[in-house]
Image (spheres, rainbow, N blue to C red):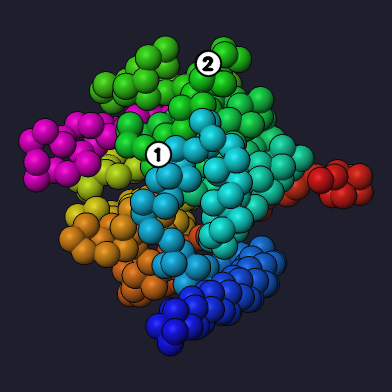
Amino acid sequence: MGAPVKRVGLVVVSVVWALAWGAVAEGADAELRAQLAQARSWLEQNPPDGTNAPARRVRMAVLQAAGDRLSDLDYRDYARSWETNTPLADLLEARHPVLGYLRGTTVDVMDEIRRTRVREGLAVWFVYNMGYVFKTPRACFGIDLDGRGVERLAPDLDFLLNTHEHGDHVHEPLFRAMLALNKPVVTRWYPGSLLVSQGTNLVFGEVGVRVDLGDHHREQPRQRDNMLMFEVDCGPSANHAGIYHSGDGNNLEKMRPMRPVDVLILHVSVGMSVPEAVRHVKPRTTFVSHVMELGHSPLPPHAWRWSYDYAFDVIRDLPEREATVLTWGERWLAPGTALQPEPDDARRSP
C-alpha cells in the first residue's frame, strides 16, 4: 500500500512545484514589462544629445535583457504569423515581453509619423533593424522597413527604398500596399517595383535619390554588386539634408557620396570598420544599425544578433556626437528642424 501513496505524493509535489514556478515566472515577466515601460519612457524623453550615452545604455540594458530571453526561432515563428495567424502573433507578444515592447513601439511610431507635421527640416524615425522613416515638410519616405503591420504606413509614404532582398530588410505586405496605391517602390528584385541594377539617379518630387551599387561581402564574388546604397538629398524644405544608407554593404570603396552627409546609416558588423567608414564619409552623425535583430541568433556558431553593448564598443573611439545607437521607435530631429504643434485631440487619440 505504500507505493501508490508515494506516487500520489510525487504527483502532488510536481503539480505544486509547477504552479509555484509558473507564478514566479509570471511575476518576473510582470516586473520585466514594468522595467521595459520605464526604460522606454525615459528613452523617448532623452534622445541622443552627444552627452547622454552612458545613461541611455543603462536603459538599453533592460531591453537587451528582454531580447536575450527570446530565441531566433521564436522570433521567426512570430514574423511568419503576422499575415497567416494573428492569434498566434498576439499570443507570442503576450508571452514574450520583448515582443510586446516591439509591437508597442511599432504601433506608436506609425501613429506618430502620421500625425507629425514638419514645418522645416527633417524628422527621422527608427522602426526596426535598418528600417527608417524620413519626413520633411514636403515628403515622407522609408528605407528597409520591416515589422508587424508596417503596411499601415503605405498611405503616409511617398516612396519606399529597399537595399536588398533579405527578410530582415523587407516587408512584402508594405510593398504590395505601396504598389496598389501606385506609389514607387525601388528594389533590385521585387516584381512590379522600379528595378535598379546599376548606379542611377532618381527624383521623387523635391527629393533626389542617387544609387551606389555595393557589395554585401566584397570578398565573395557572388556577393558583389548586390546592394543598393542610397544617397538622398531631402530637398530645399529640409535644408537639403543629406542621408546615406548603405544597407548591408561592406565595401567602403563603393560608398561615394557626392555631397555632404548629415545622417549615415550603416551595419554594425558586416566586415567593414565602422570608424573607418565614418572617417571616409564624414557625416554629421551616424546611426549604427542592424543591432538587436531578433531573427538572428545571439549564440554560436552564427551569433549575428549584435547587442547594444557591442554596438557602443564599435564606436567607442568616435566622438559621441558623431555616432550613436537608437532603439526601436525613437525619433531624431536634424539640427534646425521645426515641427508644427500637435492639436490636443491628436495627442490624445489612441
Mark 2 secondary-structure assignment: helix
Identify residue for label 2. 179
Residue that appears at 40% across and 45% down? 76
Q: Quadrant location of the N terminus?
A: bottom left
Residue lying farthest to the right in this orientation: 344
Q: What residue type is labelled 1?
A: His
Mark 1, Cα crowd under 10 Å, few <14 / some 14-19 / many 20+, is many
Q: x, y percentage for residue 293?
A: 40, 54
| Residue 219 seen | yes
Residue lying farthest to the front in this orientation: 1
Queried whether the magenta region covers residue 167, the answer comes back as no
Residue that appears at 48% across and 45% down? 78
Query: Relative to residue 261, is residue 335 drawn left or right?
Result: right
Queried whether the magenta region covers residue 230, the answer comes back as yes
Q: x, y percentage for residue 121?
A: 64, 44
Q: x, y percentage for residue 267?
A: 33, 52
Q: Which amino acid does label 2 sit on?
A: Leu
Q: Please give the label number shown on residue 169.
A: 1
Residue lying farthest to the bottom in this orientation: 2
Query: Relative to residue 350, is residue 169 drawn left or right?
Result: left
Q: Please give the label number shown on residue 349.
A: none
- Give the Cα separation between the discs numbered 1 and 2: 18 Å
Residue that appears at 28% across and 25% down? 199
In the displayed structure, would residue 208 be above or below residue 183? below
Bounds of the magenta segment: 207-236
Query: Closer to the camera, 258 or 208?
Result: 208
